[in-house]
């Protein structure tokens, strides 16, 4: 939070100085975006992305304003306010940071920033920036932190027609983590990331990695249960419920976008020794076609997950206390969310104005019985994890 305090002081000082300036309007740029999204799931037995069998506009509709203040030719302050229609998502200051453009190659950022792990991380809320209504849940499903407080450094270089960009970032996170549809308070005091991006003509390629460590998560009962296991002498099983390990994620994407058609693909891999963070392998592939002011596209996406949990070494039958601990360990492990899901979606986008588009999208979901499979709520345990999500959207940038 100290970073935000520093930036707030910078903003106040600059605003006071700018009030006496005749060039205030030249120093401030205001932009924004909005989206109205409605959707419905074809079953009453579950919810997906918050959608149920009642048509709703509340899950993903939003409005945002961004202000960019040029303090000097090289220094800029940016802030974004975001308002969600979904009560489960926090509205307010989405980011606040300083950008220093040292020269044509180097730039630096400091403040509250979007975590730039995915291909569309920076514009995830700007539906106008991509063809889908909802980016594929298997990849963008909230495993990582959307924001962090810290700094980043970016180096750009050009080789003939090849553009190369390398970004490194470091910071912390203090907020919540979505765990099987439940928000868990979490602190991460060490986030390190690296990104390599290349583009040439219609092709774009990108690879990134992020390491998160020094965790504290407020999952009720985990710490107490770990203490009981440790006192009983089962240290390896106890360590599963502590947060003294790393979570590492890798990402790669390829994109080709011509005047006629486009191909987008992205793959992620998450490795973790933490019981609260599953190991995940996921990807999507989107094929689309441009004609006039329309886009038509189809996307296949898939994810599978597992948890790296040591074998239960606590014996059953030796004593009531150990037997109880052993069954409790098994019950917790068996209740861990699993995210195996395949999906197929088709969509249509109509850019009826240069800054507005209308979209329609249908997604067929096929999950694994007995698993979470990315459903935000499962009301009937016998639900077969198969459903159809229908969505409509109006996107706007200004």
Image (cartoon, rainbow, N blue to C red):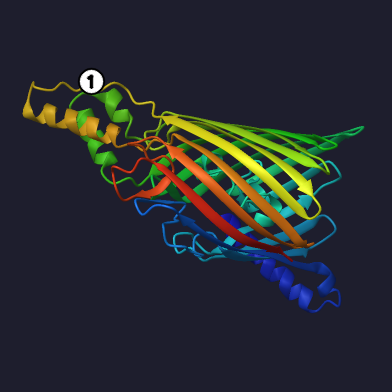
Residue found 68% across the figure and 66% down from its top: 11
Q: Is residue 146 above or below residue 84?
A: above
Q: Give 48 or 168, whichever is nearer the viewer.
A: 48
Q: Nearer the viewer, residue 181 or 15?
A: 181
Whether residue 386 is visible to the viewer of this picture, yes or no, is yes
Q: Residue 93: percent from the left, percent from the top?
A: 58, 63
Would you identify the image quadrant in which residue 14 lies?
bottom right
Q: Describe the element under mark 1 as helix, strand or loop.
A: loop
Task: Please state if 62 lies on the left or on the right of 205 as rendered.
Answer: left
Residue drawn at point x = 60 percent, y = 32 percent: 267
Pointer 1 local density, CA inside 10 Å: few below 14, some 14–19, many at least 20: few
Q: Is residue 2 above or below residue 201?
A: below
- Image coordinates of residue 244 in percent, x first then y, are 40, 33
Residue 259, placed above or below residue 157: below
Percent of width and height locating residue 126: 65, 56
Residue that sits furthest to the right in the current view: 160
How many marks can you see?
Answer: 1
Residue hosting label 1: 313
- Asked whether 208 or 72 is in front, the reply is 208
Q: In the rendered image, which quarter is residue 10 located in?
A: bottom right
Q: Position of residue 22 (x, y in %)?
A: 86, 78
Residue 207 shown left or right of residue 250 in the figure: right
Residue 88 in which image quadrant: bottom left
Can the viewer see residue 82 in this picture?
Answer: no
At horizontal 78% and vertical 68% (from top left) the residue drawn is 28
Whether 67 is drawn above or below 45: the answer is: below
In the picture, the quarter occupied by the N terminus is bottom right
Task: Look at the image and tell me in which quarter the C terminus lies.
Answer: bottom right
- The residue sitting at 81% across, 53% down in the picture is 292
């Amino acid at each position: 939070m100290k970073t935000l305090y520093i930036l707030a002081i910078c903003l106040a000082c600059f605003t006071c100085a700018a009030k006496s300036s005749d060039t205030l309007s030249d120093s401030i740029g205001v932009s924004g975006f909005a989206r109205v999204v409605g959707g419905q799931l074809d079953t009453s037995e579950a919810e997906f992305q918050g959608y149920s069998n009642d048509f709703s506009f509340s899950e993903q509709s939003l409005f945002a304003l961004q202000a960019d203040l040029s303090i000097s030719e090289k220094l800029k302050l940016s802030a974004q306010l975001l308002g969600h229609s979904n009560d489960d998502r926090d509205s307010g200051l989405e980011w606040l940071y300083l950008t220093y453009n040292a020269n044509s190659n180097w730039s630096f950022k400091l403040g509250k920033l979007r975590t730039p792990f995915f291909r569309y991380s920076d514009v995830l809320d700007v539906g106008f920036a991509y063809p889908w209504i909802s980016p594929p849940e298997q990849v963008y499903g909230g495993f990582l932190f959307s924001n962090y407080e810290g700094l980043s450094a970016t180096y750009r270089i050009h080789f003939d027609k090849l553009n190369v960009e390398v970004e490194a970032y470091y910071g912390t996170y203090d907020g919540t983590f979505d765990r099987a549809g439940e928000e868990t308070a979490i602190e991460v005091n060490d986030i390190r990331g690296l990104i390599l991006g290349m583009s040439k003509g219609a092709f774009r390629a990108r690879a990134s990695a992020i390491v998160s460590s020094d965790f504290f998560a407020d999952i009720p009962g985990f710490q107490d249960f770990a203490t009981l296991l440790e006192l009983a002498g089962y240290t390896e099983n106890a360590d599963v419920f502590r947060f003294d390990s790393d979570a590492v994620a890798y990402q790669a994407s390829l994109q080709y976008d011509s005047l006629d058609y486009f191909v987008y693909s992205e793959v992620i891999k998450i490795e973790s020794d933490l019981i609260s963070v599953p190991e995940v392998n996921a990807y999507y592939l989107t094929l689309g076609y441009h004609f006039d002011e329309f886009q038509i596209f189809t996307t296949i996406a898939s994810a599978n997950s597992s948890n790296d949990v040591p074998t239960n070494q606590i014996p059953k039958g030796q004593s009531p206390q150990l037997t109880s601990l052993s069954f409790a360990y098994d019950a917790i492990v068996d209740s861990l969310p699993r995210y195996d899901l395949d999906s197929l979606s088709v969509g249509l986008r109509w850019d009826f104005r240069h800054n507005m588009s209308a979209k329609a999208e249908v997604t067929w979901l096929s999950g694994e019985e007995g698993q979470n499979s990315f459903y935000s709520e499962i009301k009937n345990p016998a639900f077969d994890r198969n459903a159809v999500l229908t969505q409509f959207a109006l996107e706007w940038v200004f």
